[in-house]
Amino acid sequence: MSPRAACRLEQLGFTEVYDYTTGKADWLAHGLDTEGTQAGVLRARHALRSDVVAAVPDEPVGEVRARVAASPYGFGLVVAANGTLVGRLRAAALAADPAVPAEQVMEAGPSTVRSDRPLAELAAVMRDHDLTVMLVTSPEGWLLGLLPRGLAEQTLGAEGRTG
């Protein structure tokens, strides 16, 4: 909204007026509330899981391996101190020397999606490409969680809608 519009809203008595300069796409990607015809669309954020194993870059692979073995997923993620997703540790990387730091064996820059993507669209992509999960990050690259295909399909079915 323009500064002029914000000023006018304040003059009309609105007490919480914000000048959100980054735009609608960023607003949606951060999972902020919306109104209108698309407000009820299920999105990735509605079926996120946060129980994925996350490691810091200098963490020894042996420590990560033990946590991954106890998790429902066969991989771990490498996350920087500020929350930015920097890599994935697949089974082959987890089989490395236990003393090696995660950042030395990780797959850098894994594919991600944003939390505002329509859930039906992502479920279809996962089915079409035989994917079991998608990694979900914020526009800043911060790890928000993962989207399992089964949970996406279950969420869509439970709501009785696909888009």
Image (cartoon, grey):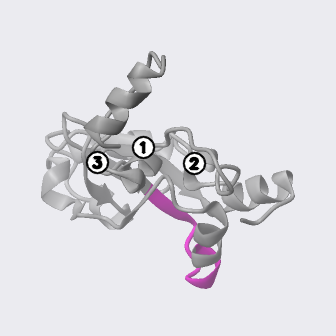
Work out whether residue 60 or residue 25 is closer to the camera in this orientation and state it. Answer: 25
User: Distance between the Cα atoms at labels 3 and 1?
Assistant: 11 Å
- Amino acid on which the number 2 mark rests in the picture: Pro
Q: Disc 3 or disc 1, which is closer to the eye?
A: 3
Answer few, some or many: residues within 10 Å of disc 3's Cα (few below 14, many 20 plus, some between 14 and 19): few
Say whether disc 2 or disc 1 marks the residue closer to the N-terminus: 1
Q: Are marks 3 and 1 in contact (CB under 8 Å)?
A: no
Secondary-structure class at tag 1: loop
Name the foreground residue: 51 vs 63.
Answer: 51
Crowding around mark 1 (Cα neighbors within 10 Å: few <14, some 14 to 19, many 20+) is: some
Query: Closer to the camera: disc 3 or disc 2?
Result: 3
Which SS class for mark 3?
loop
Which quarter of the rendering shows the C terminus? Answer: bottom right
Q: Which residue is drawn at 19% across and 54% down?
A: 97
Q: What stretch is highlighted in magenta?
A: 126-135
- Using the image, determine if residue 13 lies above or below residue 154: above
Q: What residue is pinned by disc 1?
A: 30
Instruction: Residue 105: say if magenta.
Output: no
Residue bearing the label numbered 3: 22
**Side of 72 relative to 154 (left or right):** left
- Mark 3 or mark 1: whose residue is earlier in sequence: 3
Which badge, 3 or 2, comes first in the chain's sequence?
3
User: What residue is disc 2 on?
Assistant: 72
Q: What residue type is labelled 1?
A: His
Residue 33's x, y, as percent?
55, 38
